[in-house]
Image (cartoon, rainbow, N blue to C red):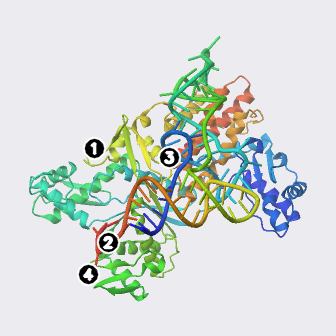
Amino acid sequence: MSNTHPLKEQIALLIGIALETVAPDAPVSLEIERPKNPAHGDFSSNAAMQLARPLKRNPRELAQLILTELPASKLIARAEIAGAGFINFHLAPAAWHGIVPQIRSAGAQFGRGDAGTGHKVLVEFVSANPTGPLHVGHGRQAALGDAICNLYAAQGWQVCREFYYNDAGVQIATLANSVQARAKGLKPGDADWPEAAYNGDYIADIAADFLAKQTVKSDDREFTASGDVDDLDSIRQFAVAYLRHEQDLDLKAFAVRFDHYYLESSLYTDGRVEATVKRLIEAGKTYEQDNALWLRTTDYGDDKDRVMKKSDGTYTYFVPDVAYHIAKWERGYERAINIQGTDHHGTIARVRAGLQAVSVGIPQGYPDYLLHTMVRVMRGGEEVKISKRAGGYVTLRDLIEWTSKDAVRFFLLSRKADTEYIFDVDLAVAKNTDNPVYYVQYAHARICRVFEEWGGMADALDGADLAPLIAPHELVLMQRLAEYPEIVATAARELAPHLLVHYLQMLAGDFHAWYNAEKFLVDDATTKLARLALADTTRIAIVNGLALLGVSAPEKM
RNA sequence: CUGCCCGUAGCUCAACUGGAUAGAGCACCAGCCUUCUAAGCUGGGGGUUACAGGUUCAAUUCCUGUCGGGCAGACCA
């Protein structure tokens, strides 16, 4: 199964043959479009307009020549010239019927492609430091990251889902101090409470478990508390393990899993940071000034040079970041995608500069970044800003508990990453057409209900005569279904799952309209089987599409 | 002050990366249930694509400038 439009390619082929005669030497980028206006046919080509200038001829005349040379095909009902020189193709209904058995035999494979076979991609997302529960922004990352991984896997890529975190920096020290203060019985606001501290209630929970000498186990570590309030190292390790476990629970509730956790501290212990600095110095891209070591990031388009090694001898944060990305490259990931908040955009230029400066063959745009904006939460007409668990922010788990995993995923994926999103909790739990996730799932449930009512075996639909499928609603639906593989491919390429969300809403809309206009389980057996086959095709696209988004497709609602 | 992102119907967003008359949903108005889920569907009004130039057969899309919003701009992470 390819990831292109099943019919578009065939039309392009026909035009290509005609062009060999009309304009054998002129370079034309053969793009077949699907016109927005149905009157303009099913497909259209602007080849004649592109050729008008190089050939110095009237585009409509060229279009006529192309039409004359176009090989005959059963697919095309008629082709005509329109507007400034568009060639519009109206397809025969039988051409659309062809996609139904094609999709049904592909089944779960429908929409998958092999463009990425043999290639490895690493997607880094969430990457929250273990200093508190995941908030809604992490939720947006988790939804985006998981969907993008699914989309790439659907194109044949070998995907690694990676969670990177700082387990030893300033913030972890703050965490340890906060837990220690709680363990000593202090509370936020007390005179001795540390100035830089985390104030959420969860800190008190950690302190209590630490004193009780509990053991905590997370996906990537396990630790038993010493219970000694003066043992800051034990407190730190316990708190990190505790919060990693909390985050695991958050991720589990969201049905997101990671293949690998990567620790910033490991970059120091395994010598990668030192090695990176050495490489940069040897490449002549550094200089010393004011007792600090600087990297000439301005050679690679950055605004100003950046300090790598501070005058106190420690490294700035982007040095391990560069070392980490060299490691990604050396691990064989020819493509790396980082999903982060827009507040990180300042780091892009310097990380890429560092990767270029080491000259180890890393391509210029490595890694890719997908930056997302803030999520605000509305409930009962008011913005929700605080939560019981975390204090200052709404957590991912709050949101899932108020609504559902499916709604949170679908909603957070429904907008381009770079637009701000307002999450409407009331809408997410609504059981009506206003709620887009419900609308799509409901279409699926309706199809399942029809099949239950029918009671036959899906196999009976193989080879069904599809000639009765000529109603406008049916043609629209088949046209929509044929677009699915392209949508998946584009959503992957553009790192834009919202395209798929949008598509599924359109598909569900087409189905609901058809369902309302025609009864499927009619007396005429041929018509009945044809309609059931098309409904089954729709079911496949909805199930496959929702699966890529990490959203379930219930059979009953 | 500088850099990046954004600006499309009253609201929330699309627009196949330069195509034809800029599309959906919400809200508003008018309709549709002896029917496989009305938990749904059909129709209608609503736009100088922030503004001004430019590039070309064609601009919401690309370039320049202006205005408005978001995020950054430490030897912080």
Residue at 69 percent of width and 39 percent of height: A476
- Mark 4 lies on a secondary structure that is loop
Residue indicated by mark 3: A414
Quarter of the image for residue A331 reads bottom left
- Mark 1 lies on a secondary structure that is loop
CB under 8 Å between callouts 4 and 3?
A: no
Looking at the picture, which amino acid does disc 3 mark? Ser
Question: Mark 2 or mark 1: which comes first in sequence?
Answer: 2
Q: CA distance from mark 2 to mark 1?
A: 34 Å
**Closer to the camera in the image, A12 or A303:** A303
Q: Nearer the viewer, mark 2 or mark 1?
A: 1
Looking at the picture, which amino acid does disc 2 mark? Ser
Indicate left or right for A139 with B54 as reference. Answer: left
Can residue A196 be seen in this snapshot? yes
- Mark 3 lies on a secondary structure that is loop
- Mark 2 lies on a secondary structure that is helix
Looking at the picture, which amino acid does disc 1 mark? Ser
Q: Position of residue A332 (x, y in %)?
A: 49, 72
> Which dot marks residue A311?
4
Q: CA distance from mark 4 to mark 1?
A: 41 Å
Indicate left or right for A446 with A206 as reference. Answer: right
How many numbered marks appear? 4
Residue indicated by mark 1: A387
Q: Nearer the viewer, mark 3 or mark 2?
A: 3
Question: Mark 4 or mark 2: which comes first in sequence?
Answer: 2
Q: Quadrant of the N terminus of chain A?
A: bottom right
**Closer to the camera in the image, A41 or B46:** B46
